[in-house]
Image (cartoon, rainbow, N blue to C red):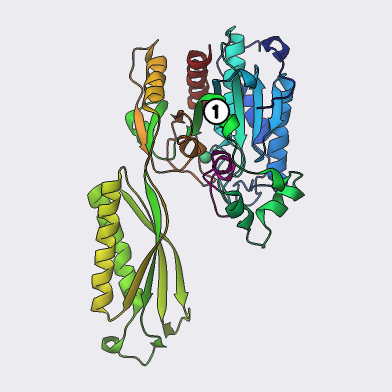
């Protein structure tokens, strides 16, 4: 696996003086907070292989080196900080990502990385003795904000994204992924699957801010992920007849906007009935004139549900309704599935072990919840046992500057992650 100069535990320096879990959390959080924050929106623009991304990566390297951890960048640009010798195998790995969506929040990604370092500090403070190598990872380009594909770093490592397809990715300015990586100082010719690295990992645990309100509703600070919901994107093309908005009688129109609007309402209805989610968040109208009946309305549906059968029911119901509305208005309809990701079930044995570890001292049952959001842990679950911890998000808002987690909940997350790492690696 080629870790460089891994230092012994003692090299991490004297333990922090404060006895509270996460005592180093606040300092790290403050350091990271200003990087890539837009002054107007207050949101983050830490897009892959840009200046703010480089600053975040420099921060990660400084955290690793400052603790005497073995620092390395893998062939796909993911950053690793090792305690112990990676070659020993059966490593316990934790971490997340530092990049953001456009105008993203402070917590999605960084909470997991900062909590990982803070949990390690907490374990050293406890005098933990590690039986297995431990690593903290920062996966590159998780959000896909720049090249349109999420989890590029973990997809490349696991082989879920081929080198050829990765080379074809371009950003909004036409800059290819290889060019962007090269400009950031990395070798794009090196990218590709990394089975040897994955073979040396026994478990990966990602801590993440919850992107929903399940924990807020149950009154828990921390939860364990059960699964990532199956999800997909469908493009609905409604084709009618362009005509004059002033002179065409209502009865004579073939207006695709009407069929589209009715379909949006049907999506809401179907999702509510099934306990799923369905969203038309993007639309393109031709010709796009204020005084013209559209010739075509193209709407993109994003839908997610707890299981495949429910998702099929929801999307099937929306398609059927769209067909009926299109027919009623004399409008043509085509529906194309543009992408699809099946359900990801996290490793049951690891999940149960996390539950045991976290319930050990309190006797409490830690809630187990599904999520509609994708993560590196989901990508890697096909290759290695993975699990996730969620930290309460009081509003559920995510991918927005308003994303938030309370300080006490973040500290509880650090404590839970420390317990989990101790249980798995010591
Ligand atoms: Zn994330």
Q: Residues within 10 Å of mark 1 (few under 14, many from 20)?
A: some
Q: Which residue is rendered at x = 61% and y = 10% of the image?
A: 125
Q: Is residue 11 above or below residue 377?
A: above
Q: Is residue 35 visible?
A: yes
164 with respect to 352 (left or right): right
Q: Which residue is rendered at x = 59% and y = 47% of the image?
A: 43
Check the image and name the residue furthest to the front: 196
Quadrant for residue 123, please give it. Answer: top right
239 with respect to 21 (left or right): left
The residue singled out by tag 1 in the image is 199
Q: Which residues are magenta?
A: 146-161
Task: State the quadrant of the N terminus.
Answer: top right
Tell me where residue 367 appears, x and y as whole percent.
Answer: 34, 26
> Is 377 included in the stretch rendered in magenta?
no
Front residue (pair 153, 255): 153
> Is 155 included in the stretch rendered in magenta?
yes
């Amino acid at each position: 696996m080629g870790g460089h100069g891994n230092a012994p535990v003692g090299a991490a320096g004297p333990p922090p003086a404060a006895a509270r879990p996460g005592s180093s959390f606040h300092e790290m959080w403050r350091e990271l907070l200003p990087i890539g924050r837009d002054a107007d929106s207050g949101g983050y623009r830490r897009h892959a292989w840009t200046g703010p991304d480089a600053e975040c990566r420099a921060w990660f390297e400084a955290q690793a080196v400052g603790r005497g951890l073995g620092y390395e960048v893998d062939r796909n640009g993911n950053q690793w900080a090792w305690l112990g010798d990676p070659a020993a195998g059966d490593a316990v790995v934790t971490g997340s990502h530092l990049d953001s969506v456009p105008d993203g929040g402070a917590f999605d990604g960084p909470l997991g990385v900062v909590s990982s370092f803070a949990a390690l500090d907490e374990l050293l403070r406890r005098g933990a003795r590690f039986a297995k190598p431990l690593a903290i990872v920062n996966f590159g380009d998780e959000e896909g904000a720049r090249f349109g594909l999420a989890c590029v770093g973990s997809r490349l490592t696991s082989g879920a994204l081929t080198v050829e397809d990765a080379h074809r990715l371009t950003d909004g300015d036409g800059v290819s992924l290889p060019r962007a990586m090269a400009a950031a100082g990395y070798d794009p010719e090196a990218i590709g699957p990394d089975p040897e690295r994955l073979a040396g990992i026994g478990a990966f645990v990602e801590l993440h801010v919850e992107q929903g309100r399940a924990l807020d509703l149950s009154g828990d600070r921390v939860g364990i992920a059960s699964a990532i919901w199956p999800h997909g994107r469908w493009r609905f093309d409604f084709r009618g007849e362009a005509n004059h908005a002033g002179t065409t009688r209502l009865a004579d129109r073939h207006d695709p906007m009407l069929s589209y609007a009715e379909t949006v309402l049907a999506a809401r209805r179907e999702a509510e009935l099934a306990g799923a989610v369905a969203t038309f968040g993007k639309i393109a109208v031709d010709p796009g004139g204020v005084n013209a009946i559209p010739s075509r309305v193209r709407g993109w549906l994003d839908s997610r549900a707890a299981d495949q059968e429910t998702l099929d029911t929801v999307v099937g119901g929306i398609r059927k309704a769209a067909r009926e509305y299109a027919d009623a208005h004399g409008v043509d309809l085509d529906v194309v599935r543009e992408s699809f990701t099946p359900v990801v079930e996290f490793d049951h044995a690891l999940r149960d072990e996390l539950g045991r570890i976290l319930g050990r001292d309190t006797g409490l049952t830690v809630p187990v919840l599904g999520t509609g959001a994708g993560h590196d842990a989901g990508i890697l679950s096909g290759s290695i046992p993975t699990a996730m911890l969620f930290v309460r998000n009081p509003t559920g808002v995510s991918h927005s500057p308003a994303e938030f987690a309370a300080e006490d909940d973040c500290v509880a997350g650090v404590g839970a992650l420390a317990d989990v790492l101790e249980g798995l690696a010591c």
